[in-house]
Image: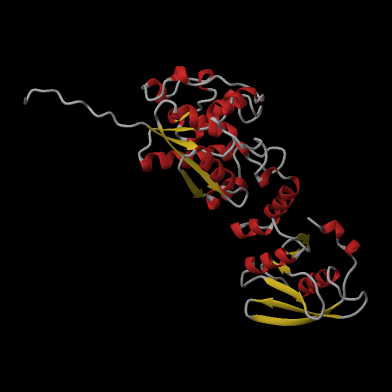
Amino acid sequence: MGNEAHPVLKKPVKALALFSGGLDSSIAVKVIQDQGIDVLGVTFTTPFFDAEKAEEAARRIGIPLLVLDISEEHLAMVRAPRYGYGRNMNPCIDCHTLMFRIAGRQMEERGFDFIISGEVLGQRPMSQNKQMLHVVAKNSGYEPFIVRPLSAKLLPETKPEAEGMVDRGRLLDIHGRGRKQQMELARHYGITGYTNPAGGCLLTDPMFSRRLRDLFDHEPDPSVRDIELLKVGRHIRLDGTTKVVVGRKKAENNSLVSLARPEDAVIHIRDFPGPVCLVPRGGGTARLEEAASICVSYGDAPAGVDVAVRCRIGRDTRLMTVRAVTKESFQNRVI
């Protein structure tokens, strides 16, 4: 009895999936799960994108999802990306690198074996060619542990494949921008309701990128709050250090009030309906009067009359009397 061999319990293999919620990342999860591997999805939130799409897709395909707020680390990268920006203010190569780096840290902390992503070789000519996939993985610090199941057969063998944790022969060789193979796999796996691969990141939006570029040009140390402000209202540059944000509707007025800090100037028209205006970090008397005049120009006060305006900074409120300026006088300063 004492000499009987005891079976060795094999440690389950666990993969951490960078999960955007798109079709490619969903299929990548299924391909890995087909090999009996446990998968935990990880997605990220910043002021530029949220986790809503990933959360919905994770529920549809039935995987647990870890949501991490990486706002501060991501903003620092966006300000000075090593590989620059795309067509707008999107630093895709540096962004992917950062995501793999953070996922790698999570992999180590949580005892996972490797990382997967839904990237497809050649799907994005600039950021997903063979060289850039290598650069992203190498710069993340976790290259040996990154498996891209959809294009793995076209890429060098990784540590999990070489060690038998993943069967390379059951991975895929998808290439290019076409979606036919992915759509066939979606039918095979019963994946429905998936969205288009593009969109979701404000850094690819031209108007938002213009505002972000202006912020970086005029603010040496922008905060996450400053980024949130870029999503709200009309932005009008008064000078090199001052701008005014004008609410366009009730929801934006409420947002400006909630985003205001004690050092900001919050401007209301006293006796007529009109917008909330916010001057980040306040300003001198002349600039606040100019901001108040712009605020009145978007309100319902009659033209050519003096209008009382409240300007609150922290706990102090001052009353100013100004007249509306013509919108044409500041249109060239709208960001």
Residue 114 makes an appearance in the image: yes
Residue 138 makes an appearance in the image: no
Q: Residue at position x 63%, y 40% from top?
A: 91
Outermost residue toward the top in this view? 169
Outermost residue toward the left in this view? 2
Q: Is residue 243 left or right of residue 226?
A: right
Query: Which quadrant would residue 54 be assigned to in this image?
Result: top right
Q: Is residue 164 above or below residue 117?
A: above
Residues 138 and 235: in front is: 235
The C terminus - image quarter: bottom right
Q: Position of residue 193 (x, y in %)?
A: 62, 37
Query: Which quadrant would residue 296 be assigned to in this image?
Result: bottom right
Query: Which quadrant would residue 177 be assigned to in this image?
Result: top right
Q: Residue at position x 76%, y 59% from top?
A: 235
Q: Position of residue 184 (x, y in %)?
A: 60, 24
Residues 109 and 264: in front is: 109
